[in-house]
Image (spheres, rainbow, N blue to C red):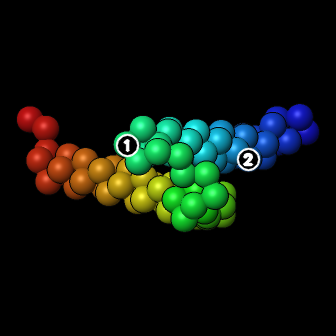
Amino acid sequence: MQDKRSSNMRPLFVTILLWLCSVVLLFVIKNVIELFTGPVAETWVDLALVLVAYLMFFLLAPLQNWMRRRSRKRARHHLNARTSDSSSHPSH
């Protein structure tokens, strides 16, 4: 029972961690922009960064699902390629 609950919490933890990393990246981008242009508080840049962080919160789960499906498909493809190679070349 405990293992099932912890396996369900892991994707949520990873999602939150990825979202926090993306927010930190947005703050770094904001600081770099401020170095070159001056303060951006209460400007369109500030609003755009907040909206991107908001969108990332909702897009992370679909992106994770897409990446998971893609990696499974790639793994199946490599496994099928190995299987077909070994069946077409019998060992001596």
Residue type highlighted by circle 1: Phe
Report x, y in % for residue 47.
60, 62
Tell which residue pokes out farthest to the front in this image. 38
Alpha carbons under labels 1 and 2: distance apart: 37 Å
Badge 1 is on which residue? 36
Residue located 13% across and 38% down the image: 91
Residue located 72% across and 40% down the image: 13
- Residue 53 or residue 2, whichever sits in front: 53
Report x, y in % for residue 17.
65, 39
Image quarter of residue 76: bottom left
Quadrant where the N terminus is found in the figure? top right
- Residue 50 or residue 60, whichever sits in front: 50
Residue type highlighted by circle 2: Leu
- Residue 34 or residue 28, whichever sits in front: 34
Pointer 1 local density, CA inside 10 Å: few below 14, some 14–19, many at least 20: few
- State whether residue 52 is above or below residue 10: below
Which circle, 1 or 2, is nearer the viewer? 1
Q: Secondary structure at mark 2?
A: helix
Image quarter of residue 44: bottom right
Residue located 8% across and 35% down the image: 92
Residue 78, label in figure: none
Badge 2 is on which residue? 12
- Residue 61 or residue 36, whichever sits in front: 36
Image quarter of residue 14: top right
Pointer 2 local density, CA inside 10 Å: few below 14, some 14–19, many at least 20: few
